[in-house]
Image: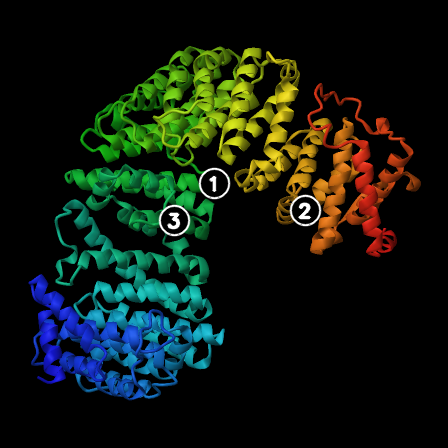
């Protein structure tokens, strides 16, 4: 048996249903793979029309695998041996004949294999590729032309821009001839249109500007496209072809708008004609969604039809904005354009089903938190373009007239109830969108209040019964236009919302909650009917709290509604606390992982904390559980660290917003639990959240913290200094060291937050300790982050440091500050830190009448060290004149006093300055100063 017969038998066995036969065949295939003519025999099997299709396809798979592994040593996953040059040449010569095969699957397989070879060999090792490709595209054999197209398409997927650009001088003409030949199927013509754009883009990117050849080709293709678009629908001018043309025009206008301007102008009339024809068919489809669009036999006609409409609107949107004729057309035909918009914004059964199966899709489409998912959401964005194109005044005027006429027209067709309710829903949706655009741009829109009242009456007359999407739209429109509603309409909406909150239909509940949120956002004390809404707040809040089986999305929106309700009428809040506070406690556990949840939750807690009537409930019902969560672990929660961080954030929010004097017991319990967390937790983020929370306690109730004393005699300040020592000591290990940058950033924020200079000086000591324990991390972090004032963090910190280096109230802190400054200067010199050495600061000078003098930061630090050394030598430390009179921060227990004293600091500075001067840099710094 020769090699070819053995290989053919192996290929056949690899297709066997029997596992053992397949296993043995795969082993034989691996042995045959290393033979010299293995790939050539596979090609022979692949191209032999007498062989079974399954064997030919398997041969193609094995050939592709072989080429990937052995073609060139530079390829990823290369395996020895490499294919010989002789074999490569034979494969490049033989394989192209398979492009003309009668079997489309074989054509595609050969095209993919040739493209894989071309990636490696073109242009240097396969100079004849262009000739081979053109011979296929210009062939008299239809199969060869189609095979050439498939191969070209594979090249556009795999070639880089440089390789594609080498084909552009010869590829445009054959593609054009194929596209204009309506004898080819629409799938082949759409392929040509797509490839044409890819080659145009490659040609443009390589040359960085349109050349004469490119401009001529684009103009030629665009003229052909306008001609094709003008043809009536047929199987030679299908939805797919026209959709691909509009997609081409849209993309090309983005890439080279100057070349497309004339084409856009020509496309407006033909685009509008197609849209009007499609709209007629679309209305039929709305009335009976079981029908097939235009009843043609095009494959996937509905899909291509919707894609065509979307792409037409995309081109028209560009014309409305970029072309004078387009703007004029929009201005003069706005009424008809709005009618088209309403038609294609109508909800289809597919959209309806998708919302019902996943309420997240409805929320995303409604809130605008999603990219385009269907034709309706695309038109939502295009409506804004249309408004800007025709002007707000023109849109407002025409839209009001259009709304009246369209409602009358729709009501006359009420015999088709599906068309009636879907069109009304679409009209309300458009009104809602337009109003939001005007509001966002701070423009006034004249709302047709009589029609809004009529739609509201749908609710009281039960006209929305059975049409839940219409019911939802009336509620949402009412929320959007809340302040325009009359008293009776507002009462109807409130009562309907109360009923809908208890609906078993999740979409109805969701829309009721969203509508409620819109009402709460708009109604304020200036609204003439605010009291009508405000007096129902208790009922609405209780109804919200009573809803069960909330999805995460509904839970999040309910929380936002509660926040808004509290802000509408704070006087009602105390009556709600008995139910509201436990409800918030339940939400705390269930939903803290929902994106955005904790932000709204903390905001709501903050609003409650500002109300002095609420503090008793918060103290007695909420805080004990939160403090327990912070200080204790539980087996019910997988990630204890996350629970602790959230609990600490809630506690910090309460302390930050509380307007009354903080309960002494609360402070003591909170400080104890936070202290325990900091001293025992392994998670650095938990530690820093706790430290941040303590900062707020210090800011709001420093005197009460100072008054705390435990059984051992330590007071609150001793706890604070123990915490600082704990988190900054080097022996804390890598877990904390990795998060020193968090400490730096958060402390910078606090320094900007606190207005009290004494607090800022107290926070500055954190940087002093960090400099002593984590010099490199501190310097690296300060070098790359901005300061609170928007400038350099490095300059922000060291400017304050060198201005108040003697203002630290304790001697050991003053000594530590000097040693830390020496450390910084030493580090900067060793690392040649150009940013630090080039930083300049402004220093007040009495000799210049208190004017500020600019000098290098490094020179000022050296000046401080020299002056301080002289002071230490003369034993005349006088820092009383520098201490802020309002600074009351005192220590009873000098935790760090043993580490830094006058003698050790004096000796350190003496050694440092001696070493510094021996490096011949002291003179340089003196001159620089």
In the image, is 665 to the left or to the right of 399?
right
SS at circle 3: helix
- 707 or 235, nearer to the observer: 707
Q: Is residue 633 visible?
A: yes
Helix, strand or loop under label 1: helix
User: Where residue 398 sits in the image (x, y, percent)?
Assistant: 39, 45
Label 3 sits on residue: 381
Would you say the residues marked 3 and 1 are in contact, meaning their CB atoms lie under 8 Å apart?
no
In whole angstroms, how far apart are the C-alphas of marks 2 and 3?
Answer: 40 Å
Q: Position of residue 111 (x, y in %)?
A: 24, 76
For the question of whether residue 150 can be seen, the reply is no
Nearer to me, 143 or 893: 893
Foreground residue among 306 and 703: 703
For the point 16% across and 75% down, which residue is it? Answer: 59
Identify whether 471 is placed above or below 370.
Answer: above
Quarter the N terminus occupies? bottom left
**Marks 1/2: CA distance?**
36 Å
Residue of label 2: 792
The residue identified by callout 1 is 440
User: Secondary structure beneath disc 2?
Assistant: loop
Classed neighbour count for the residue bearing mark 1: other residues with Cα under 10 Å, few (<14), some (14–19), many (≥20): few
Check disc 2: other Cα within 10 Å, few if <14, some if 14-19, many if 20+. Answer: some
Vertical order, 672 against 203 (above or below):
above
Image coordinates of residue 85 in percent, x first then y, are: 31, 87
In the displayed structure image, the side of residue 798 where residue 624 appears, left or right? left
Q: CA distance from mark 3 to mark 1?
A: 13 Å
Residue 362, by quadrant, is top left
């Amino acid at each position: 048996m020769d090699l070819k017969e053995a290989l053919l038998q192996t290929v056949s066995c690899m297709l066997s249903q029997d596992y053992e036969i397949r296993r043995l065949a795969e082993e034989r295939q691996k042995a045959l793979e290393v033979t010299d003519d293995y790939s050539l025999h596979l090609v022979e099997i692949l191209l032999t029309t007498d062989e079974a299709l399954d064997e030919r396809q398997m041969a193609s798979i094995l050939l592709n695998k072989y080429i990937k592994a052995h073609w060139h040593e530079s390829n990823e996953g290369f395996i020895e041996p490499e294919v010989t040059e002789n074999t490569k040449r034979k494969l490049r010569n033989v394989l192209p004949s398979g492009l003309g095969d009668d079997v489309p699957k074989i054509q595609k397989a050969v095209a993919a294999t040739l493209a894989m070879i071309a990636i490696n060999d073109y242009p240097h090792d396969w100079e004849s590729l262009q000739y081979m490709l053109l011979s296929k595209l210009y062939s008299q054999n239809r199969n060869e032309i189609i095979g050439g197209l498939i191969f070209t398409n594979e090249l556009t997927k795999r070639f880089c821009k440089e390789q594609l650009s080498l084909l552009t001088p010869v590829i445009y003409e054959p593609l054009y001839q194929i596209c204009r030949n309506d004898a080819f199927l629409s799938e082949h013509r759409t392929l040509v249109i797509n490839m044409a754009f890819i080659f145009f883009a490659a040609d443009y990117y390589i040359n960085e500007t349109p050349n004469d050849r490119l401009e001529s080709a684009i103009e030629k293709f665009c003229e052909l496209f306008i001609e094709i678009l003008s043809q009536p629908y047929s199987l030679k001018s299908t939805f797919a072809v026209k959709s691909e043309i509009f997609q081409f025009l849209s993309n090309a206008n983005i890439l080279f708008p100057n070349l497309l301007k004339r084409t856009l102008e020509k496309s407006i009339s033909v685009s509008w004609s197609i849209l009007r024809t499609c709209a007629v068919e679309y209305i039929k489809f709305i009335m009976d969604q079981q029908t097939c669009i235009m009843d043609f036999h095009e494959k996937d006609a509905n899909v291509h039809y919707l894609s065509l409409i979307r792409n037409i609107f995309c081109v028209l949107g560009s014309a409305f904005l970029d072309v004078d004729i387009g703007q004029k057309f929009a201005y003069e035909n706005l009424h008809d354009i709005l009618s088209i918009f309403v038609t294609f914004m109508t909800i289809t059964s597919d959209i309806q089903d998708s919302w019902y199966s996943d309420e997240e899709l409805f929320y995303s489409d409604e809130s605008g938190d999603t990219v385009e998912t269907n034709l309706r959401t695309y038109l939502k964005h295009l409506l804004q373009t249309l408004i800007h194109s025709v002007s707000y005044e023109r849109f407002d005027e025409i839209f009001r007239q259009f709304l009246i006429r369209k409602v009358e027209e729709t009501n006359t067709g009420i015999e088709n109830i599906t068309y009636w309710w879907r069109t009304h829903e679409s009209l309300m949706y458009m009104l809602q969108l337009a109003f939001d655009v005007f509001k966002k741009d701070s423009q006034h829109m004249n709302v047709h209040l009589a029609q809004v009242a009529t739609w509201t009456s749908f609710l009281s007359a039960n006209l929305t019964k059975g049409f839940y999407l219409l019911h939802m739209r009336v509620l949402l429109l009412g929320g959007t236009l809340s302040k325009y509603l009359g008293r009776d309409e507002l009462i109807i909406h409130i009562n309907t919302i109360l009923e809908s909150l208890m609906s078993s239909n999740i979409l109805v509940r969701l829309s009721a909650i969203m509508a409620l949120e819109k009402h709460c956002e708009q109604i304020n004390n200036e609204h003439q009917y605010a009291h009508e809404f405000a007096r129902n707040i208790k009922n609405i809040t209780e109804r919200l709290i009573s809803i069960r089986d909330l999805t995460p999305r509904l839970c999040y929106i309910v929380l936002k509604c509660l926040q808004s309700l509290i802000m509408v009428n704070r006087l009602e809040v105390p009556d709600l606390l008995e139910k509201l506070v436990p409800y918030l406690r339940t939400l705390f556990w269930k939903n803290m992982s929902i994106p955005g949840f904790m932000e709204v939750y903390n905001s709501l807690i903050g609003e409650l904390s500002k109300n002095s009537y609420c503090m008793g409930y918060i103290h007695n019902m909420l805080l004990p559980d939160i403090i327990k969560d912070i200080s204790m672990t539980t087996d019910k929660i997988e990630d204890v660290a996350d629970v602790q961080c959230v609990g600490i954030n809630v506690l910090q929010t309460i302390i930050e917003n509380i307007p009354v004097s903080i309960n002494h017991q609360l402070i003591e319990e909170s400080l104890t639990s936070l202290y325990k967390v900091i001293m025992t937790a392994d998670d650095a983020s938990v530690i820093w959240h706790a430290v941040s929370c303590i900062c707020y306690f210090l800011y709001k109730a420093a005197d009460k913290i100072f008054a705390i004393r435990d059984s051992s005699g330590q007071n609150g300040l001793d706890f604070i200094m123990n915490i600082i020592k704990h988190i900054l000591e080097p022996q804390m290990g890598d877990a904390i060291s990795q998060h020193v940058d968090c400490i730096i950033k958060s402390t910078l924020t606090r320094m900007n937050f606190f207005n009290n200079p004494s607090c800022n000086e107290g926070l500055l000591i954190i940087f002093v300790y960090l400099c002593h324990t984590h010099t490199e991390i501190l310097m690296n972090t300060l070098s790359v982050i901005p300061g609170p004032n928007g400038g350099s963090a490095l300059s922000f910190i060291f400017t304050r440091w060198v201005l108040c280096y003697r203002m630290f109230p304790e001697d050991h802190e003053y000594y530590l500050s000097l040693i830390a400054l020496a450390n910084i200067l030493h580090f900067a010199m060793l690392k040649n830190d150009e940013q630090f050495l080039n930083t300049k600061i402004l220093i007040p000078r009495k000799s210049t009448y208190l004017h500020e003098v600019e000098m290098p930061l490094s020179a000022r630090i050296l000046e401080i060290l020299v002056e301080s050394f002289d002071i230490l030598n003369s034993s005349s430390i006088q820092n009383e004149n520098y201490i802020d009179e309002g600074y009351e921060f005192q220590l009873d227990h000098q935790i760090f006093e043993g580490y830094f004293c006058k003698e050790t600091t004096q000796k350190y500075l003496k050694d440092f300055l001696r070493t510094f001067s021996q490096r011949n840099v002291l003179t340089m710094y003196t001159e620089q100063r």
